[in-house]
Image (tube, helix red, strand yellow):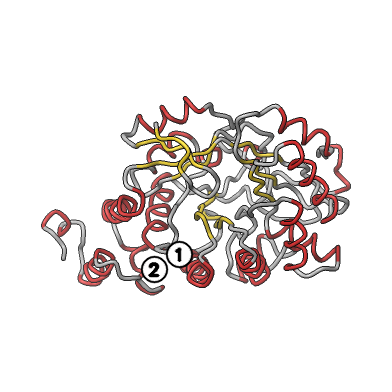
């Protein structure tokens, strides 16, 4: 199966066998995935990732016209990697947008197709508060896709409202919520989670909430926080659990690796992953997450230049225009301090690395090819 051009990239029989398996469109298992992640040269990972990218999405790179709104950064949880949230006793360093302020932000953007709403877990912003907000948004923009609330937010909302995940999600869907983002997954391994985010929803709860949403025909995204205290084995475990749920529900739109940024948080002593680490992780994601149609590089977090590089390593989506109050990553030292790009800027960014820009909606229906 291997051709001559690939032979020099593969230094051992085990890698050759794994490579042949991938080229034959066979799924690699966790043990094979770990070996590939740890031993394969970047050139091999990039070759395999792009081969899969082209098969799934050709030379297209997707983006959408969207805004991100964070209603508050007041949060009851204490995640060690977070530079963004503030506890109630530090409200002077936080913000709480009113429903009217959120509506006003949406009204300013007449051509967006999606609003992305996530934020801190505020004890006074519960399920019924957000149901009312969603209804108000749909009243002024009935066709706007509302992608809202991480599983962490939803677990807290449902618990406080004393309803099941299914009941809570049904209420939100009936109000007009269309899908879920993928945040809050972090790393699924219990021992790592205990050290970096022990008081937020568990792995089992995160997966159950997304599985329930999928059963209610509410698609979602999936994420993974990398580049902190996790090891490759934890990365493989995390991806495997997502892959298994996707086999079961086919409800995930895209997988989004999120790079840990070390500014202004309780883990600032940890050195950030290098760009080579980024390329390895993203390339491997495209190879291992074989039942995900899309892998996204979230440009406000990873940076525009790195995003362009990753488009040559299996990535086919870069999120969108953003133009929002996003501070989750900028407060932690991300490169993009004011995350905003025009459609023309995104199109140029994609074309400059030889890819074809595609404006999509949230569900990856093509709206325009550039």
Between 197 and 269, the residue placed more toward the observer is: 197
Q: Residues within 10 Å of mark 1 (few under 14, many from 20)?
A: some
- For marks 2 and 1, give the CA distance: 7 Å
Between 292 and 49, the residue placed more toward the observer is: 292
Is residue 147 shown above or below 212?
above
Whether residue 1 can be seen here:
yes
Q: Is residue 365 left or right of residue 337?
A: left
Image coordinates for residue 204, horizontal then vertical, percent: 65, 72
Identify the residue shown where x is 77% and y is 67%.
167
Q: In the rendered structure, are the residues bearing label 2 and label 1 in contact, judged by CB atoms less than 8 Å apart?
A: yes
Any mark on residue 334, and which? Answer: none
Picture quadrant of residue 16? bottom left
Between 262 and 226, the residue placed more toward the observer is: 226
Q: Which type of secondary structure does the marked residue at label 2 adopt?
A: helix
Identify the residue shown where x is 77% and y is 36%.
102
Image coordinates for residue 315, horizontal then vertical, percent: 40, 47
Pick the quarter of the image with the N terminus: bottom left
Image coordinates for residue 119, horizontal then vertical, percent: 73, 47
Q: Residues within 10 Å of mark 2 (few under 14, many from 20)?
A: some
Whether residue 42 can be seen here:
no
Image coordinates for residue 296, horizontal then vertical, percent: 48, 48
Q: Which residue is mark 1?
A: 232
Any mark on residue 34, and which? Answer: 2
Is residue 236 shown above or below 268?
below
Q: Earlier in the sequence, mark 2 or mark 1?
A: 2
Picture quadrant of residue 116? top right
Q: Is residue 191 left or right of residue 239?
A: right
Is residue 145 shown above or below 196?
above
């Amino acid at each position: 199966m291997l051709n001559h051009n690939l032979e020099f990239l593969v230094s051992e029989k085990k890698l050759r066998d794994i490579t042949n398996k991938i080229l034959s469109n066979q799924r690699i298992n966790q043990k094979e995935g770990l070996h590939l992640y740890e031993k394969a040269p970047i050139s091999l990972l990039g070759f395999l990732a792009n081969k899969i990218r082209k098969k799934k999405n050709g030379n297209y790179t997707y983006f959408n016209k969207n805004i991100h709104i964070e209603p508050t950064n007041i949060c009851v949880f204490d995640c060690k990697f977070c530079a963004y949230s503030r506890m109630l006793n530090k409200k002077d360093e936080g913000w709480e947008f009113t429903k009217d302020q959120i509506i006003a932000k949406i009204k300013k953007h007449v051509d967006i197709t999606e609003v992305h709403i996530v934020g801190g877990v505020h004890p006074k912003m519960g399920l019924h508060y957000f149901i009312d907000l969603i209804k108000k948004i749909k009243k002024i923009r009935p066709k706007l896709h509302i992608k809202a609330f991480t599983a962490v937010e939803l677990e807290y909302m449902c618990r406080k409202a004393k309803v099941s995940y299914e009941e809570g999600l049904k209420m939100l869907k009936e109000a007009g919520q269309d899908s879920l983002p993928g945040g809050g997954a972090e790393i699924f391994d219990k021992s790592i989670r205990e050290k970096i985010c022990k008081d937020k929803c568990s792995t089992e709860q995160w997966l159950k909430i997304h599985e329930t949403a999928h059963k209610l025909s509410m698609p979602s995204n999936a994420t993974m926080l990398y580049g902190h205290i996790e090891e490759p084995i934890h990365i493989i475990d995390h991806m495997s659990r997502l892959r298994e749920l996707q086999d079961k529900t086919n409800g995930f739109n895209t997988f989004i690796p999120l790079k840990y940024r070390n500014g202004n948080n309780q883990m600032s002593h940890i050195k950030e992953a290098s760009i080579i680490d980024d390329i390895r992780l993203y390339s491997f994601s495209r190879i291992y997450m074989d039942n995900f149609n899309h892998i996204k590089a979230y440009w406000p977090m990873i940076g525009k230049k790195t995003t362009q590089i990753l488009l040559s390593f299996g990535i086919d989506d870069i999120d969108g225009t953003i133009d929002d109050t996003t501070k989750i990553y900028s407060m932690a030292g991300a490169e993009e301090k004011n995350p905003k790009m025009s459609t023309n800027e995104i199109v140029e960014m994609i074309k400059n690395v030889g890819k074809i820009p595609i404006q999509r909606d949230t569900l990856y229906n093509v709206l325009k090819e550039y």
